[in-house]
Image: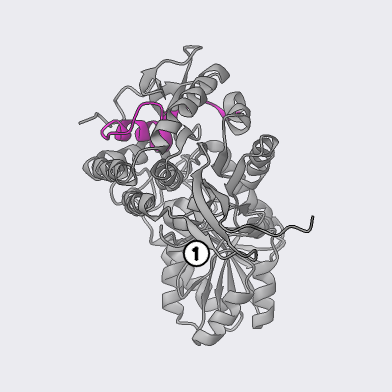
Amino acid sequence: MSDLSIDAAWDELYVDGEWRASESGETIAVEDPSTRETVTEVAAATEGDVDAAYEAAAEAQEAWGEQPPAHRQEVVRQFLGALDAHSEEIIELLEYEVGGSAIMGETSIQIAADHASEAATLPRRMKGKHAASNIPGKENQLQVGLKGVVTVISPWNFPLNLSIRAVAPAIAAGNAVVLKPATNSPITGGLLFATLFEETDLPEGVLNVVTGRGSAIGDRVASHPESDVVAFTGSTSVGKRVAGLAGENLAVPAMELGGNNAHVVTADADLDRALDAAAFGSFVHQGQVCISINCHVVHEGVYDEYVAGLVERAESLPTGGVHDPETIVGPIIDESQRDEMLGYVEETVDAGATLETGGHTVDDSLVVAPTVLSGVTNDMPAAANEHFGPIAPVISFSDVDEAVAIANDTEYGLSGAVHFGDLATAKEIAERMETGNVHITDQPINDEAHVPFSGIGASGVGRYNSDAFLDEITETKWISIQHEPREYPF
């Protein structure tokens, strides 16, 4: 079995079934967010390396796409077996590379396994259709074809499952893949997949992994002429650029972008249940989740009690480096992200909000103490921006219409949650929330591989999961057969 420890050699690219150094020979340091020490190095790919990866993918794809569904299914199942066999090592990699707590690592494995399991069913579900014709004697056939080469640009926050949800379906359907992981998570978002697929019967060249800085190779990856689909997960600002570059080659953009997700709590909600969900939805993985709670929208009648309960839960969470297995709230990925979110907190307090707890680092580290802000309005920085941290701004509302208006007062539309005593009213609120996903008596962080996942507005274009993503990575061809002589007007 492969060595998947952080101490293994991770300083090569994976192109055409081979591990190779980058053209430049340069590497990039990978730092442990808990200690801020360099734990390994990865190759810094050049545009020439990127071209080689796409050349390999394009050459390998045709033969792979002609493989029987049962064989493609078996390869994905083999990957699932490798994922399970190495799960403890992968959880440790997430700990060292992205500051993932034990809960984050275990959750990542579970979701990744769910996506791989669902992907394994896709080859047998790729079936054509017949459609009736308006023309006498004509038969219409709709055939499923492949896009070809799928580009996957994965994020650093949940790199394992947010990579596999695109990589596994693309391969299962018969496409080839070029995977470019985020600079902060080159192993668990990229090189790990090459290692795991080496334990399967996947042919050389079907999966290629190029690591490197976005500033150096990002544009070439997003705009490569061999790319037919670009699946990107990340910020809206970067996503707009990636989609624009993909569009220059008429590649299909599948973009999951930023979010500003509201957690709506009404006067007759079960407050303990709402607070339990709120603590998880705000503070798991330090709030570094695109579908985490960005603001708590709470009825004025229960507002003070809710804030007090949220403060109590926030202050009870173990914080620190994630090499302590008891830690719940660990480090932010890097100084830039940490400083930005703390800036939002400071600006929000300056605008009139009250800092109830948190708002500071722990021992001058990358760990930000779980933070609760009261007296917040929707135009204050911590609520108006995607803060992407363990920060809980709490906004008051007086009636349902105001709650819906607050929840919708954003360019984003990714996820949300509603806690309400009456299910019919909760469903009414959920239906009025302008977002791709809403979860009643829960929190916004939900992902099930067999359920379509998408955002609206600035939260992206395209859809992930199951048949929804299968539509993005396949083509439909219309073939008609005129069985009987047709009468023409001349």
Which residue of the protein is positioned furthest toward the top in this rendering?
Answer: 24
Identify the residue shown where x is 43% and y is 69%: 277
The spot of residue 461 in percent (x, y) is 62, 52
Identify the residue shown where x is 59% and y is 42%: 339
Q: Evaluate whether residue 288 shows in this view.
A: no
- Residue 214 or 369: which is nearer the viewer? 214
The spot of residue 89 in percent (x, y) is 26, 38
Q: How is the image coloured?
A: one colour
The spot of residue 153 in percent (x, y) is 52, 38
Residue of label 1: 444
Q: Which residues are magenta?
A: 188-214
Q: Is residue 468 above or below residue 243?
A: below
The spot of residue 12 in percent (x, y) is 39, 20
Q: Is residue 157 above or below residue 371?
A: above
**255 relative to 402 in the view: left or right:** left
Q: Is residue 200 magenta?
A: yes
Q: Is residue 272 magenta?
A: no
Q: Is residue 257 above or below residue 282?
A: above
- Residue 122 or 189: which is nearer the viewer? 122
Q: Evaluate whether residue 6 shows in this view.
A: yes
The quadrant in which residue 356 appears is: bottom right
The quadrant in which residue 240 appears is: top right
- Residue 412 or 476: which is nearer the viewer? 476
Q: Amino acid at mark 1?
A: Pro
The quadrant of the picture occupied by the N terminus is top left
**472 relative to 176 in the view: left or right:** right
Total numbered circles: 1
The quadrant of the picture occupied by the C terminus is bottom right
- Mark 1 is surrounded, within 10 Å at the Cα level, by few (under 14), some (14 to 19) or many (20 or more) other residues, namely many
**391 relative to 402 in the view: left or right:** left
Secondary structure state at the residue bearing disc 1: loop
